[in-house]
Image (cartoon, coloured by chain):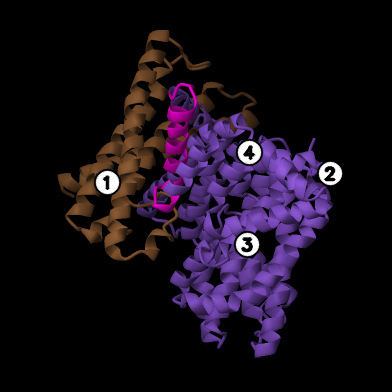
Amino acid sequence: MNVKVLLDRRIEEFILVLTMAIMVLIMFVQSTSRYFIGTSFSWGSEFAQYLHVWQIWIGASLAIRLQSHIRVDVFVKLFPPTVQKILNFLAISCWFIFAGFLAIEGSKYVMDVLTSGQTSPSLHVPMWIPYLAIPIGGTLMVIRLFQQMYFLFTSKEELYGGEEIK
Amino acid sequence: MTVAILFGSFFILMFIGVPIALSLGLASLLTMFFATNSSPSAIIQKAFTSLDSFPLMAIPFFILAGVLMSHGGISKRLLNLASVLIGFITGGLAMVTVLASMFFAAISGSGPATVAAIGSFMIPSMKEHKYNSGFAAAITASAGSIGVLIPPSIPFVMYGVVGTVSIGSMFLAGIIPGIILGIALMISSYITAKRNGYEGTGEIPTFKDVLKALNEAKLALLIPVIILGGIYAGLFSPTESAAVASVYALIIGVFVYKELSWKSVYESFSSAALTNAATVIIIGFSISFAYLMTRERIPVIVADFIVGISDSPIVIILIINIFLLIVGMFIDTISAIVILTPILLPVVTNIGIDPIHFGVILVMNLAIGFVTPPLGVNLFVASTVGKVSFESIVKAMVPILITMIIALLVVIYFPPLSTGLPNLLSP
């Protein structure tokens, strides 16, 4: 495994697997402990929910790379390849603008939450930590979209298409 | 004007191939920027708060349980049970496909996953026994759409979250309509089989055979018992039951059936998390979109329009159904639920339809959309796993679609089929 593959896929994948494993474990222990021991910890679901939010945003970035976002491509496919390429360029650009918005406006929002000093109800973690998932997710998306743009222009069709990296 | 920007930009973005989630977000952003004076930071805030939800976590766990089970040797045992039970009848293999899909639906929440798990065994097997390959793939694809009706069901979780309806009640409400759809598909396959001379194995099972197959499948059959029993006995919430089901599927797959390696466990976790992210991120942005729609009174306008055509609930529900069937042909279930629930739910509750009943109608329509050309996801999956041409599947779909629509009409016009169980069992 070289550094390129590690950066391109493995890190995000590892985070997804790890967060998923912790979420399942917490919910499993929480639900069974209430039944068997008659007690349960209230912070468990809050922690799992924050992990879930982080997982979604990081997953949404990896999903750009693996082309697994849900989209309607039947109309695009009606056009000849050159037009398809232009439409793809347009789609990536629009997406790019929105990801940039998430990164910038999300950071501002995190700063607001940071100065307000708000903390979570049961864990008492500062709320900016869970909120940070949005600007980080937006930034990762921006990077991934740059990568897609590169694939589009260098005509690395085999990388741009639905093909998965192994 | 505001409405034109909101919907105009959404449709343009969707048509040029921007993912649905981002189309919703960007359309909301453009609308807020150009047509209202609300702060766009509301989008950020809603994107966080809508995903920071306990019920929503049922979705990743059910996806995970489904992935683990389809790789863990469970589908094979369910197929064996189904074939012992009904394999001897005329058209036996097609019947087995439908019944096994119903079993599988009870442990997995997703339609395409069911098609892939069952289809990779059954389509080749039907082809071997001289079934028309188009029919083989078509019946597998259609049987897979039962997966979203029989609990657990990811679309029902989505509907429950978006429409604030009890997820537990939705799960109960889907059971009988799911069984009705299954029986309808079996009748349809029987007729096709009779006409084309597809014979069954002819081996009428002895009591002993049935017991043996049941015994082999018992660990798999325990999953729905854990999920539904746990929810209705008040032991678990749907989210907790989904987590318990994942752990159970992991233990069975790795330690009991020994068909899951740790490498495939890792891959299952990663693919479940990825599918989940691509699915629920739609919720994150749909909330801003729905907020703008409500602000512009879209549900009220739609309601006035529909009531203006007719004031008979029967006609209104028919109009809505035709609309839903058309939408289902083009847009995937999750996006459709997330976008349409806030518009249509107020309309139908106004004319006296139970939100639980409407949820079942909505999901059933979209399930039919799974197998309606040109964009039926299940058809693509069946075509891929069964190596059958798309055109031949479409041809074989015609009688099956008619059957499914009849089943839909039955469910629409007999509300107790949906609302009976939840009313009986809910506290």
Which of pointers 4 and 3 indicates the residue nearer the eye?
4
Mark closer to the chain start, 4 or 3: 4
Q: Is residue A99 above or below residue A37?
A: below
Residue found at the far bottom of this picture: B197
Q: Which residue carries the number 4 mark?
A: B342
Q: Is residue B130 left or right of residue A47?
A: right
Residue B194's spot in the image, x, y percent?
70, 87
Residue occupying the far top of the picture: A116
Q: Nearer the viewer, residue B245 or B298?
A: B298
Across and down, in percent, residue B102 comes to 65, 62
- Please give the name of the residue rendered at 80% of the width and 35% of the height, measured from the top-left corner: B427
Residue B403 versus residue B63 in the image, above or below: below
**Are tags 3 and 2 found on a single chain?**
yes
How far apart, in angstroms, are the residues tagged by discs 1 and 3?
Answer: 36 Å
Image mark for residue A9: 1
Q: Residues within 10 Å of mark 4 (few under 14, many from 20)?
A: many
**Where is mark 2, residue-wise?**
B424
Residue beneath label 3, please?
Answer: B368
Q: Is residue B287 above or below residue B21?
A: above
Chain letter of disc 4? B
Q: Position of residue B326 (x, y in %)?
A: 60, 59
Comparing B212 with B129, the one in front is B129
